[in-house]
Image (tube, grey):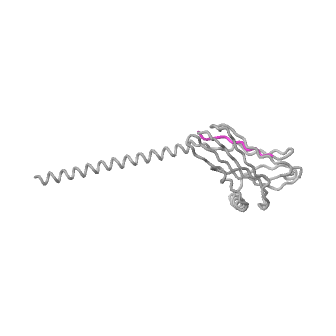
């Protein structure tokens, strides 16, 4: 009888330990699922700058491109830093424009912000009836102050120049063009991402 009681106590101890272990594993899984859901929710609320409309091209005493952005994320974007590059489509000449810009003010949700790339007549002679296409690369970094995280965006465009006196639009580039541009920037040892902290 004593042997059966000892065996019963031993098995009930093992069952209790298994039950406790099952509860602990369930609790760990619940914590992991909750943390994952929180990360997904946090990432969904991050700031994200999106173009509001196609970039505007203006030709007056020089040439300018205006990019209008809006923060479509929930969290504000702060410490916006950008580097803009404009270079000939032939990808052999050095960039005619390589400028950096830092914005101090935060960009709250749905708040518009503009970035203007201004080129003077020494960089592009707009009096010519025909100007070959140029690539435009806009690299941006900005932070989410609520979760203290830095985000990066790189935009690639092509301005189709001027044909027979008519100013052409700015358009998106193709994937093969992006690869060629990346090689071009590597050759020139231009790495906008190295500006981020």
Residue at 74%, 52% (x, y): give it.
Answer: 85
Query: For the view shown, which residue lies furthest in the left direction?
Result: 1
Residue at 65 percent across and 42 percent down: it is 79
Asked if residue 110 is among those painted magenta in the image, a careful observer would answer no
Instruction: Judge whether residue 65 is colored magenta.
Output: yes
Residue 134 lies in quadrant: bottom right
Which quadrant would residue 68 be assigned to in this image?
top right
Q: Is residue 68 above or below residue 161?
A: above
| First to last magenta residue range | 64-74
For the image, the number of numbered tags is: 0
Image spot of residue 163 (x, y percent): 85, 53
The majority secondary structure of the magenta stretch comes to: strand
Camera-side residue of 131 and 96:
96
Query: Which residue is the extreme one toward the front?
Result: 197
Residue in the image at 78% along x and 49% along y: 169
Residue 86, position as x, y percentages in the image: 77, 53
Q: Position of residue 133 (x, y in %)?
A: 80, 55
Identity of the residue drawn at 56% across and 40% down: 146
Q: Position of residue 101 (x, y in %)?
A: 72, 45
Residue 137 located left or right of residue 146: right
Q: Is 165 located above or below residue 180 in the figure?
A: above
């Amino acid at each position: 009888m004593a042997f059966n009681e000892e065996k019963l106590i031993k098995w009930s101890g093992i069952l209790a330990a298994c039950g406790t272990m099952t509860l602990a594993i369930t609790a760990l899984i619940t914590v992991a699922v909750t943390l994952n859901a929180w990360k997904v929710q946090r990432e969904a609320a991050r700031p994200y700058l999106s173009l509001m409309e196609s970039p505007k091209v203006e030709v007056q005493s020089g040439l300018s491109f205006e990019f209008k952005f809006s923060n479509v994320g929930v969290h504000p974007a702060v410490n916006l830093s950008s580097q803009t590059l404009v270079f000939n489509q032939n990808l052999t000449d050095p960039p005619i424009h390589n400028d950096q810009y830092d914005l101090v003010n935060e960009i709250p949700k749905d708040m518009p912000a503009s970035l203007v790339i201004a080129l003077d007549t020494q960089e592009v002679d707009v009096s010519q009836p025909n100007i070959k296409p140029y690539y435009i690369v806009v690299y941006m970094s900005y932070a989410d102050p609520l979760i203290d995280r830095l985000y990066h965006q790189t935009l690639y465009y092509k301005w189709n120049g001027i044909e027979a006196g008519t100013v052409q639009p700015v358009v998106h580039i193709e994937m093969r063009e992006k690869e060629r541009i990346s090689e071009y920037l590597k050759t020139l040892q231009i790495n906008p991402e190295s500006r981020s902290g």
